[in-house]
Amino acid sequence: MSAEDFSDAVLVLLGHGSTVNAESGAPVCLQAAELRRRKCFAEVREAFWRQAPQVKQVLSELTAARVFVVPLFISEGYFSEATIPGELGFGGGGPGHFSRVQQRGAQKLFYCKPLGTHDRMTSVLLARAREIVEKFPFPRPPKPEDTTLFIAGHGTEQNLNSRKAIERQADLIRALGLYAGVHGVFLEEEPRIGECYQMAQTRNMVIVPFFISDGMHAREDIPVLLGEAERVVQQRLQRGLPTWRNPTERKGKLVWYATSVGSEPQLAEVILDLVREAAEG
């Protein structure tokens, strides 16, 4: 079969999942449904690391000649590039230190690169930033040249690769010259998310969480770090409301906070690109 023909192949979209947050797996299911609709693959399956159906179980059920596993993770961190591939038999060990192709009898298994590392994520992040101000104009959407854009990521001091995807996207968007300023900010590394008010040189700020799902970090932690009272955030959650009101004025800034990238329609194309790259070797 050619690298463009996946009629013999199964696509497995791998998400982190959560046993305490039902919304964690929603983007995986959403993108799987879209790719199923396109009928590019013999089958499209959802799989997770922390919730059912778990990835090892899903893979054990597949008999297709080719299976492509696309991890819906942001960065080439220890979890996506060592823990998971190690458990799946690829060896693990970090980016570039293991083979992404595994032969299992007559079946060839491909472990694709994490979703967030792809070049097309730049347009995904820009779409998120543009959509939030267009949806909530005050009284009209601010111009990008009058706005500071922040890409908010997790980060961890345990693995330097965790922040690379965020920093790379900030660099790529900054080079386009669209916004007055573009910065990466983090939950667990410097610069911290709460420092964005001091970093912004404009009154208008847009924060895009570079997370796949609107889970605890995106819906609870970041709004609190931006200055919303935890009590208010929890009340809004209980009522099924967004936990940040767009825009909110705080510390002399007008702040728009976008949703995570997992529901962006462009992600289907990113996933297909990752599969093509894996097939071409």
Image (cartoon, grey):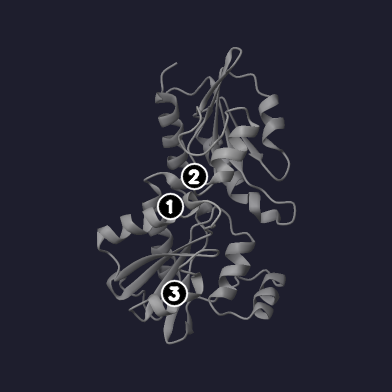
Residue 60 percent location from the top left of the image: 70, 25
Q: Residues within 10 Å of mark 1 (few under 14, many from 20)?
A: some
User: Residue drawn 38% across and 64% down?
Assistant: 130
Q: Secondary structure at mark 1?
A: helix
**Which residue matches tag 2?**
76
Residue 36 has which mark? none
Classify 159 as above or below 38: below
Mark 1–mark 3 Cα distance, whole angstroms, equals 19 Å
Camera sees residue 264: no
**Of the pair 248 and 113, the residue shown nearer to us:** 113
How many numbered discs sit on the rendered protein?
A: 3
Per the image, the residue denoted by label 3 is 196
Q: Secondary structure at mark 2?
A: loop
Earlier sequence position, callout 3 versus callout 2: 2
Give the image quarter of residue 181. bottom left
Of the 4 image quadrants, the one containing the C terminus is top left
The answer for how far apart the CA atoms under marks 1 and 2 are is 8 Å
Image-based side of 57 in relation to 137, left or right: right
* Residue position for label 1: 164
Q: Residues within 10 Å of mark 3 (few under 14, many from 20)?
A: many
